[in-house]
Amino acid sequence: MRSESPDPTPLQPVILSGGAGTRLWPLSRESYPKQLLPLQDDSWSLLQQTARRVADSRLFLPPLLVASHDHRFLVAEQLRACGIMPNSILLEPIGRNTAPAIALAALHICREDPARILVVMPADHRIDDEDEFLRAVQVAANAAASGSLITLGITPDHPEPGYGYMKMGAADETVTGAWHLDGFTEKPSQSVAESYLEAGTYLWNSGLFISRADTVLRELEQHAPEVIEACRRSLDAAEHDLDFLRIEEEAFRSAPTLSFDHAVMEHTTWGRVVPCDPGWSDLGSWQALWKQGSGDSAGNTIRGRVVSDGVSNSLLYSDEPRLLAAVDLDDMLVVTTGDSVLVAPLQAGGKIGQLVETLKLKGYPEATEYPLCHRPWGSYETLAEDSGFKVKRIIVKPGGSLSLQFHEHRSEHWVVVSGEACIQKSDRQHILQENQSLHIPAGTPHRLSNKSDMPLTLIEIQCGTYLGEDDIVRLEDIYGRMGPKETSRDS
């Protein structure tokens, strides 16, 4: 006998913003993973789109984010830029996959309201039909209210061996639109994927989960007690830092690296699935990005300053003002950024992660670092570098301020391009306007600030025997980056 549950809204969005950023290298990197990039929309990153998707206060509470400690200021700034104030941002000291991340979120929310229904979403997925997404979430929330663990299953429109699959079982007897889960399959072969499509009872595994917070804890206690125990200890020892909650590292490191599917969903008897077709993709590879792009008549997906002739079935992506020109290519991937160029057959995209590991082993900084480095006060980009000198463009946002610091091995010369710079040099204050400059000798305490309501842009010329980013001694910092675990590259 089916019955309609009371309206369970407002729901608690939980956005998982982890990821190593290797599969879309060189555009995505460890220091700037794909959820922070505008891959679907020129205005908003995938993280911002995910947050905006659940911004209706009639249906959703402010989101809770679980993010990497290294990306904390980027995540906070992107949320601020789209006008979203989060419930909290939990900072993972290291990545441990989705089971510990979801455990942290459930433990945190249970302290506020154990019956609150969580809507757990990766930050880096594409969803085109938001009305269909919201419909499926509301169906799932009705089922979750009675203690079930719901996942959204994507109705496949082609045999895709690159996705995981779920099998639909019998219809749920209590909520219309939900089915029992009858098993998971990891990425199948092409022939098996074709048989799944023909059967009509298999769905793509979206990685989207809906459940009460106390239900998540109940199932983790039963099926993955080592996960919940490590997360409980790490959350109990967490420390507040500005707008973040830093998860304690030693206890969290003891948590097994497990996905929520493997830890819970493959074992629970409370698993349910809600089929939906919201125009979903996990954008997990260059080939997926090519498929999701607005292709031309020759089957090409093109972004940026690109000119091509005789090119077909290819992805050409220029992330820089420089021109990318291509002639007589088929089934190829060509990507340019400020410091790297990737050329490969489009079908070989799965090997990119292995390539990035090779680059790491050989010590190439391009493997993990992005040429444009974002900081809580703004950003900087290295324009030129050689023996004895380095030239950077620095942008300080309104109200931004670098730490009070000095360098042991280098001097700096600052030239203001636009805006107004307020500079503390030793015990004197200097105000610099456009085309004015100031020299900072090695060993001199200094701080650069922007006290105006317009961005400040300047050119920094460094000279010295050593120009590494770790030549910095902080004396004061308004962003709390003075602790022993902070990397000196935080500027």
Image (cartoon, rainbow, N blue to C red):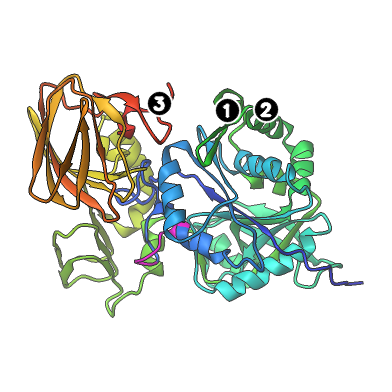
Residue 482: numbered disc:
3
Residue at point 54% right, 73% down?
A: 157
Provide residue 114's location: percent of width, then percent of height: 78, 47
The answer to which image quadrant residue 449 occupies is: top left
Left or right: 123 in relation to 170: left
Residue at mark 2 to residue at mark 1: CA–CA distance: 8 Å
Residue wearing tag 2: 233
Query: Quick one: 392 or 177, which is closer to the camera?
Result: 392
The answer to whether one can see residue 341 in this image is no
**Label 1 residue SS:** loop
**Label 2 residue SS:** helix
**What residue occupies the far right of the structure in this picture?**
1
Instruction: Tell me the amino acid under the disc marked 2.
Output: Arg
Quadrant for the N terminus in the image: bottom right
Find the magenta span and give its range. Answer: 41-47
Residue 248: numbered disc:
1
Residue at point 7% right, 49% down?
A: 435
